Amino acid sequence: MTVRDYYEVLSVSRDAGTEEIRHAYRKLAMRYHPDRNPGDADAEVKFREAAEAYEVLRDPEKRARYDRFGHAGVQGSGAGGFGNAEDIFAHFSDIFGDLFGFAGGARGSRAQAGADLRYNLTISFAQAAHGDEISLSVPHHVECPDCKGSGAAPGTRPETCPQCHGTGQVRRNQGFFQLAMPCTACGGTGHIIKKPCPRCKGEGRVEDEHEIKVRIPAGVDNGTRLRVRGEGEAGGHGGPPGDLYVVLTVEQDARWERRGQDLIFTQELSFVQAALGCRVEVPGIDGPLGMDIPKGVQSGALLRLAGQGMPWPGRKQRGDLLVSVKVVTPTRLSARQEELLREFERAGEETPFAKVKNAAKKIGKAMGLD
């Protein structure tokens, strides 16, 4: 059976960090877990595949060998199969630890990464067009400054749990298998805090609100997510903080209709301007732009000013400014204006082509063809 690339299995890039790999694995494991897919052989294969990939990529040494030599570099080290019951227990103890919040062996007291946060931000059209730097006041949890995240009162420290001896779990024999359960005495942390920190009440984190600056790239649109690393919730037991995701809503500008990076401006023209052509001034995001209107342009025509639209974020290219022509028919005419228009109409009827057309029409009527 062909073994898929481990990074492809977890849908992560080759430079993905440990936390990204862990999150990707947890998502797949929860989705394809046998308990959620009873009798589904395909889900079981994908579950084992994800577990195998995670087993290698979470371990720096195994991952380095895999990156250098591929699957051959990790054969016999736990990837692609498990040798005995102890191997099975060790591996799946770690799997269920990641899924349900406890872990095997000495991993019970490991640090936990903080949760990611979302901040919804509305910006003006001008800010989206040119970019900006915005200060945000973000409420979140941070590491307690008094206990440095340990949860224990200053001058003390957490003690090893006497029931699980710091492993965070207790083992029970059930037939052939040995099962691991979270330690009820310490809640799976492996430690007991006898004297909690007064400031954080043993949580290791406190609520805080601080100001951060977020750079808005030029050209962003509705739904754009900006990631600010390390500005999410504080981690547990000294773990790394999560990230902050700023989700943007861009206000509309009455002058333009936006379609991706292109902008559409409606230019009204009189009958005379449309017939004879003219030069007009249209608004651009960097200032007014001159534009030549060709003779005989029709209402609804779309004229293009290349490279005058919204920037593409992170690139030098820009979209286009599209000018939609709208010929406006006058509703109030003076007697002189009506006279001139009728004269114009008559002049059109006197052209050679018009004379031929009228003659043909008369002949057809005489012959009963009209």
Image (cartoon, rainbow, N blue to C red):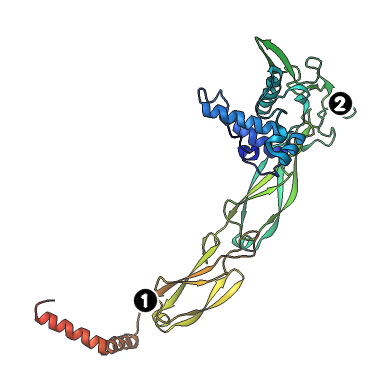
Camera-side residue of 125 and 291: 291
Given the image, on which type of amino acid does mark 2 rest? Arg
Label 2 secondary element = loop
Foreground pick, 22 / 327: 22
Judge left or right: residue 330 versus residue 48.
left
**Other residues around mark 1 within 10 Å, as few (<14) / some (14–19) / many (≥20):** few
Residue 6 left/right relative to 42: right
Q: Position of residue 158 (x, y in %)?
A: 84, 24
Residue 363 lies, with reference to residue 143, above or below; the image says: below
- As shown in the figure, which amino acid type bears the numbered disc 1? Thr
Which disc is residue 157 wearing?
Answer: 2
Q: Quadrant of residue 92?
A: top right
Question: Is residue 53 something that shows in the picture?
Answer: yes
The answer to whether residue 57 of the structure is visible from this angle is no
Looking at the picture, tell me which residue is in the foreground, 248 or 260: 260
- Residue plotted at (65% across, 40% down): 7
Q: Position of residue 123 (x, y in %)?
A: 62, 56
Image quarter hosting the N terminus: top right
- Looking at the figure, which quarter contains the C terminus? bottom left
Residue that badge 1 annotates = 329
- SS class of the residue under badge 1? loop
Residue found at the far right of this picture: 155
Q: Residues within 10 Å of mark 2 (few under 14, many from 20)?
A: some
